[in-house]
Amino acid sequence: MKMQLRTYLPDESRAALAPLWKAFACAQDLKIDPWDFALRLTYLFDLGVDKSDLRWLVLHGYVTFRDRVRRFQPSTNLAASGDPRFMLTEAGALVAGLSAEGADSPLGRSTNAPEIVPIGSGLPRWDCKLRQLWFGGCVVKRFRLPASNQEAVLSVFEAEGWPPSIDDPLPWLPKRQCKERLHATIRCLNANHKNRLVRFRGNGTGEAVLWEPIAVSAANRPTAPLGFGRAA
């Protein structure tokens, strides 16, 4: 049975992702910093990668780029940045199908894995009035008691249109306390789900929160309650 990507990618962007995926996979196999395998813009152009496809991947948070000194923001003009190096983000690796245990190439298919189907084709939705998190027409989590830190994170995700990650939105504390608080908040965000369809995690620095869909088998797909929520 075939394995499907959990997030839609245009065919052209998926092709642009392939060399970056390979570089990321090599770094993962060697257990070294992925930036040691980052690919130069000129090299990607020589491979035939289209600038628009690369820009699409950057703006969706699947690819990031920097020079030897600093990391650029997605809004930075690629051509005006000299010859920056590009690397897959954690979100991009997930979209490509690369896990901590390794995976086939993003253009390949697994013949032995169970069929994985996406839950909807869009993004989660945080209903701040009902205090409910929805995804794919199903309630993921419902808050019955105040949870200001969790709700603050969900509100920022909702306000920003559910990008792959957001910076820590919680009020300032000394650095160590911020990291501990954010870690505890992420742990709570992943607890008590009615339907386990999304997962939250940190980025390894204690300064950001990432979200990702959880693929489920067709046989275990939850049934959305009639007349509630919206198609995600």
Image: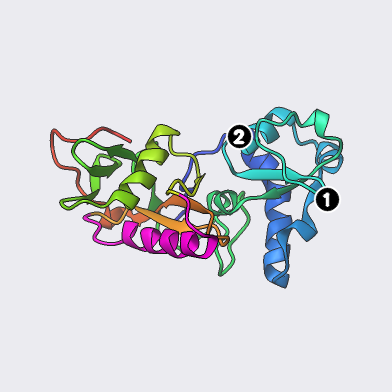
Q: Can residue 141 be found in the magenta stretch? A: no
Viewer-proximal residue, 44 or 218?
Answer: 44
Counting residues from the N terminus, which is met first, the one under dot 2 or under dot 1?
A: 2
The image position of residue 16, as x and y in percent, is: 69, 40
Tell me the residue at 49%/62% (across/down).
179
Q: Which mark, by number, is residue 68?
A: 1
Q: Amino acid at mark 2?
A: Leu
The image position of residue 11, as x and y in percent, is: 60, 36
Tell me the residue at 64%/38% (across/down).
58
Q: Amino acid at mark 1?
A: Arg
Q: Is residue 3 left or right of residue 149?
A: right
Q: Is residue 221 above or below residue 158?
A: below
Tell me the residue at 39%/59% (across/down).
186
Q: How many marks can you see? A: 2
Is residue 213 visible in the rendered image? The answer is yes
Is residue 123 visible in the rendered image? The answer is no
SS at mark 1 in the image: loop
Is the C terminus in the top left, top right, bottom left or bottom right quadrant? top left
Dot 1, how many residues are within 10 Å of its Cα: few (below 14), some (14-19), or many (20+)? few
Q: Is residue 23 above or below residue 80?
A: below
Magenta stretch secondary structure, dominant: helix
Q: Which residues are magenta?
A: 172-194
Q: Is residue 100 left or right of residue 148?
A: right
Tell me the residue at 81%/49% (across/down).
69
Farthest residue, direction left:
226
Q: Which residue is mark 2?
A: 59
